[in-house]
Image (cartoon, rainbow, N blue to C red):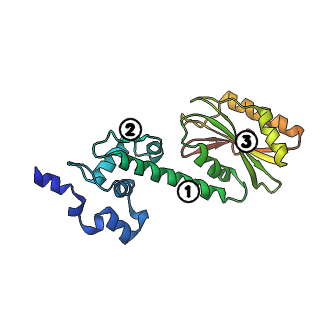
Amino acid sequence: MKEDIKLLKIKDWKEEDRPREKLLLKGSAALSDSELIAILIGSGNRTESAVQLSQRILTYFKNNLNELSKTSVAELCKFNGIGQAKAISIITALELGKRRRLENALVVPKITCSKDAFEILNPIIGDLSHEEFWVLHLNNNHKIIAKQLISKGGVTSTAVDVRIIFKKSLETLATAMVLGHNHPSGKLNPSPADKQITQKIKNAANLIDIKVLDHLIITQKAYFSFADEGIL
């Protein structure tokens, strides 16, 4: 039995296969998600190495880091070998990754296509478990001058007050906008309500000479563009 446990210890692996040593030799990009998490937690339990424990945690969350990032300290502590300190380390690292991605998105100087808008909105709403409706207000060069949260809703819908949108547009002297909201269900197809609110906002925008360039439906890894699909 002792020999079996010994075989699971990372220190018994080849040096180039150990997560820390592998990172030093090949760089962080060479490591799998489970190996990166193993470095964070440092050790496993009596029957699992840190890598094996990390693999089990990722399997539980369907090998989806977005799903893992939404968990709580208490839920992570249910895994044998994960205490409060290790759980906090995992959650902190994933939150830092999310914030870094958001900062990278903010350097996009202007919106030239639907993908640009997706890169801005996805870090904000892509992995939420409830719906949120956002507006990107743009100037003449289609540079972002304001990002506005319009409403938060439930799992399947959120209310949108058009007056709040155009109050911000007038305050910032915006000449164009991109609409965006997320679908926690993962389904990209627009609902009749999505189409209705898009048309309502577009009609109101036309009255004050503001262009609605697009409306994006966002999920964790993909998006639907009203403009790209020719239904704006």
Q: Secondary structure at mark 2?
A: helix
Q: In front: 223, or 148?
A: 148
Residue 72 image offset from top left, x and y in percent = 43, 40
Q: Secondary structure at mark 1?
A: helix
Q: Residue at x 84, y 35 (%)?
A: 204
Whether residue 174 appears in this view of the structure is no
Residue 67 image offset from top left, x and y in percent = 46, 42
Q: Quadrant of residue 183?
A: top right
Q: Secondary structure at mark 3?
A: loop
Going from N to C along the chain, the mark reached first, 1 or 3, is 1
Q: Residue at x 29, y 64 (%)?
A: 17
Q: Residue at x 57, y 43 (%)?
A: 126
Q: In front: 104, or 180?
A: 104
Give the spatial CA distance, label 1 vs label 2. 25 Å
What amino acid is found at the position of numbered circle 2 in the picture? Glu
What amino acid is found at the position of numbered circle 1 in the picture? Arg
**Mark 3 or mark 2: which is in front?**
2
Give the spatial CA distance, label 1 vs label 3. 33 Å
Give me the disc on residue 75: 2
Give me the disc on residue 100: 1
Q: Which residue is mark 3?
A: 230
Q: Residues within 10 Å of mark 3 (few under 14, many from 20)?
A: few
Going from N to C along the chain, the mark reached first, 3 or 2, is 2
Quadrant where the image shows the C terminus: top right
Give the spatial CA distance, label 3 vs label 2. 44 Å
Q: Residues within 10 Å of mark 2 (few under 14, many from 20)?
A: few
